[in-house]
Structure formats: C-alpha cells, structure tokens
Image (cartoon, rainbow, N blue to C red):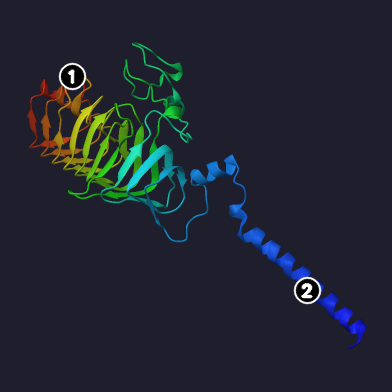
Amino acid sequence: MDLKAIKKGYKIIIFFSVIAFLLFAVMLFIWGGDNRTVTPERQEIKNAHFTATPAVPVPIVNRTTHGIIQWDETWRGEMHIIGDIIVEEGHTLTIEPGTKVLIAAKQDKANLCTFPPDMRQGIRRENEVPPGGDLEGIHPGEPFRDEANHISLHIYGTLHAVGTPDQMITITSDSPTPDIWDWNFFNFKNGILSYCIMEYYRNLNPGDGTIVSHNILKNVGECAICLPNNESVVVEYNNVSYAGHELVDIQGGTHIIRNNYLGPNPGLPAHIGIVVVRGSPEIVNNTINGCHKGILLIGGTPHIVNNSIEGCDKDIEEEEGA
C-alpha cells in the first residue's frame, strides 16, 4: 500500500475525530447547563419559582416554596410556605382536598408586597396619627402588619381550593405556639374557597364573584372575612369565630351572607358579628352567637331577614345617621 495514501487517511480520521469531539463538547455544555455549579443567586431564583413555565401542570407535593407563580399549579400533601406567594393573572392555583398548608410565622424569606402602610412596624399607640393619616384599619394596641416579616398570599388569577367534609384543606401557622398575628393576608380575585380550615391570619379578602363556603375560619387578627365595596361575594355555610375585629366586614356591594354560624367573638367593642358600612347586602338565615354586637349598621341598605342573634351584648345597633 502507498505510504502517502496511508498518511492521508490518518489525517482525515484525526480531522473528523477532532470535529466530532468539539460537537460533543458543545452539546454537552448546552444540555447539561443546569448541572453546572449552582451559585447562591441561581439557587435563590430556582427556589423562588422564577423558572420556565412547565408545559403541563404537575402537582407540587410536600414542598417548601415561595415566590411568583406564572403558570397553573396544584398543591398536594404538606406545603411549607416560607415567603410571599403571588399567583399572576390568568393562572390557577388548585389546592387539593386534605392538603395542609403551613405558613412560616412572623417571617418572610422574600417580601413581594411593599404597600407602604403595610410595611409599618411596632404597635399602634392610642391617638396615634401617622404621616398621611393612613392606619389601614389598625386599632390602638395592635401590631402593625410589618409585611417585610409576615407572609401574604395574593392570588390575582384563580383559586380552586375545594376540600371535602372528610378531607378539609388546612391553612395555618407553622408555629408551635401560634397567635392571631402570625401571617397577614389571604387574597383571591377569582374562584372558590370551600371546606377549608384557615386560622392565625390577619384577614381574608375574596374578590368579586367568588364563593366562600363551608369553611372554618378562626383565631384571626382583623376581619375574618373582609368584603370590598362595589362587588358581590357569596359567603355561606361557614363557621367563623374569634377575630380581633369583625367576623364579617361589609364595606359595600351586594354581597350575600347566608346560613353561616358566626361566633363566639366576645369582648371588645370591635368584636362584632357583622358590620355593614355601605352597600345593599343580603343577610339571611345566619346564627350570630356570643359577640359584643350581633350586627352593626353604619350605613347602606342591607336586607336582613330571619337571623338568630343570641348571647350578644346588643343584637342589632344602628349608628346615628346611618
């Protein structure tokens, strides 16, 4: 065999071997990028859910989590929430029956909510008037919301949290000695909250057209159910007790409050079963028991029919000028 031909053949083999090795190295770099050294910054982003949107929603089971949810997500098992949760508009958070959601008490790994009045710290003093005069409903002697160190859940998309009588969802503090200021807000713009035990939160704010039904809501820092103006929420078949303010606070709208058991909520003047500030709510077939006041009418034109009010210092009080 010709020696020149043999040398030429070797050169061709070596050339293509080098090309193949380089191509393999490039593909390994691309495909294996996520297996490279993970810096603390990259790990924080992964933990905070700022990753690519999953093609198909997969149940999140027994997970520790926080951050922004930019896709449909399902919670199952025991979920540990260590920082604020925001579900963006257009996406659904589903919480399956029997799921236990443990909220880290009086801490927030990554605060996402910076509304100035909610960032205040300390205790509100008697006759205190802050700059701007905005106390956002904090009563004298109560701690401010200190949002930087308290977790909130804001669902701007849709909530589907539907348990069953035998497998209720639980949303509670993770503290072994919990109190009513352990975590702040549970807000949902659309959807349903049903067959859920929720406790040790600051307030619950459902949006227009939502349903709050068959829940046990107790040990609350402010209003257990806070209903906004110019909206309509159905609140029915709930058992609501022990709130720092009102059990149901109606700021306006055409809400339907029916077939609930409200109380006990004894003690301070703010411990009221239902307060109506404005609007035309329907308040029908509720039992209100053991509150300082059963129903307080500040304004509005409520339709109040067939409610049983027992063991309250005052059944129904109408403020002068209401």
- Residue with the most extreme bottom position: 1
Q: Residue 16: which numbered mark, if any?
A: 2
Marks counted in the figure total 2
Dot 2 falls on a residue whose secondary structure is: helix
Question: Taking 253 as reference, is 264 left or right?
Answer: left
Amino acid type, callout 2: Phe
Q: Quadrant of the N terminus?
A: bottom right
The secondary element bearing badge 1 is classed as loop
Give the mark nearest the N terminus, 2 or 1. Answer: 2
Q: Quadrant of residue 223?
A: top left
Callouts 2 and 1 close, C-beta under 8 Å: no
Q: Which residue occupies 41% across, 52% down?
A: 91
Residue 15 falls left or right of residue 220: right
Q: Looking at the rendered structure, which numbered label has been put on residue 267?
A: 1
Q: CA distance from mark 2 to mark 1?
A: 86 Å
Residue at 8% from the left image edge and 24% from the top image edge: 311
